[in-house]
Amino acid sequence: MTPAGETGPRRHDDHERVAFERLIPSDIREIEPIVEQVTRECRGLALSARQCALNVPVALTEALSNAILRGNRGVREKHVRVRAVVSDHALVLEVADEGTGFDLDACTIDPTSPGNLEREDGRGLFLMRSLMDRVERYADDAHNVVRLTLNRS
Amino acid sequence: MSFSIKKQGEICVVDVEGQLIVGNRQELKQKVLDELEKGEKKFLIDFSQTGYIDSSGLGVLVSLSKKIREQGGELRLANLNDDLKTLFELTKLDTLFQIADTRERALESF
């Protein structure tokens, strides 16, 4: 049984294609060029200017940052896999690291509450959830995968 | 991505070119803290040439805001494009910072 808040590998539908797939070392300097490449791919899709300039780059940066710094604990020899799949209805970004994963439902900090507003951290997952239509995680072999789904407008 | 700091009167104006994200946020933080240590009190960060900001970048701005305030200084932000404004509104950080539409208005507000 899948724990609450988690999901499994997705089934592929007939009208989707892998638009982007890369394996990168766990180095935060890798984030910006990868995000730029994925964003460039997105510009050819039916996504809005805002989705290309804000939703995709910010949410993907958060997922990559989490994977590199938390999942792989910054160990450069560990890898992060980034995959973008496009279907008729959505853009799906998957970021896989070699960590043990985390419970999405346990991350309930509201960074917008008055007591948290001046915190330096705690906005990553909030931004992913705010900027994407769906945020899920699942375990795939030895990988922890975060899946971000953005519906095409 | 780069940061440049110029003095305009008694105000330190910081231009953020490119992204403000996990990979470069410490550079911005250190540059502003160095100026604060030298005795500068008034800071304006201009985002007219900024692409996007992630949670780490927002966190650094929050941290700098606190440190500048603790030293009796002031921080203003300026020139957020519509996407960046949305980011500040989503996180309610638009209520924490003094944000001006233009650099000139920000400079006048000190």
Image: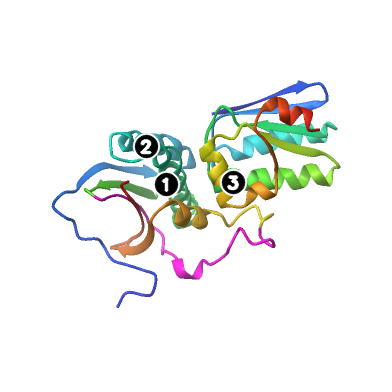
Closer to us: mark 1 or mark 3?
Answer: 3
The location of residue A153, given as percent across then percent down, is 32, 46
Report which residue position mark 1 lands on.
A60
What span is in magenta?
Answer: A89-116
**Mark 2 or 1, nearer chain start:** 2
Residue B72 location, x and y as percent? 86, 42
Three-letter amino acid code of the residue under disc 3? Phe
Element carrying mark 2: helix
Q: Would you say the residues marked 1 and 3 are in contact, meaning their CB atoms lie under 8 Å apart?
A: no
Q: Nearer the viewer, mark 3 or mark 2?
A: 3
Dot 2 alpha-carbon crowd within 10 angstroms: few under 14, some 14 to 19, many 20 or more: some
* Helix, strand or loop under label 3: helix
Asked whether, in this view, residue A100 is left or right of residue A126, the answer is left
**Tag 2–tag 1 contact (CB < 8 Å):** yes
Q: Which residue is mark 2?
A: A39
> Who is closer to the viewer here, A11 or B85?
B85
- Going by the numbered disc 1, the residue's amino acid type is Leu
For the point 72% across and 36% down, which residue is it? Answer: B76
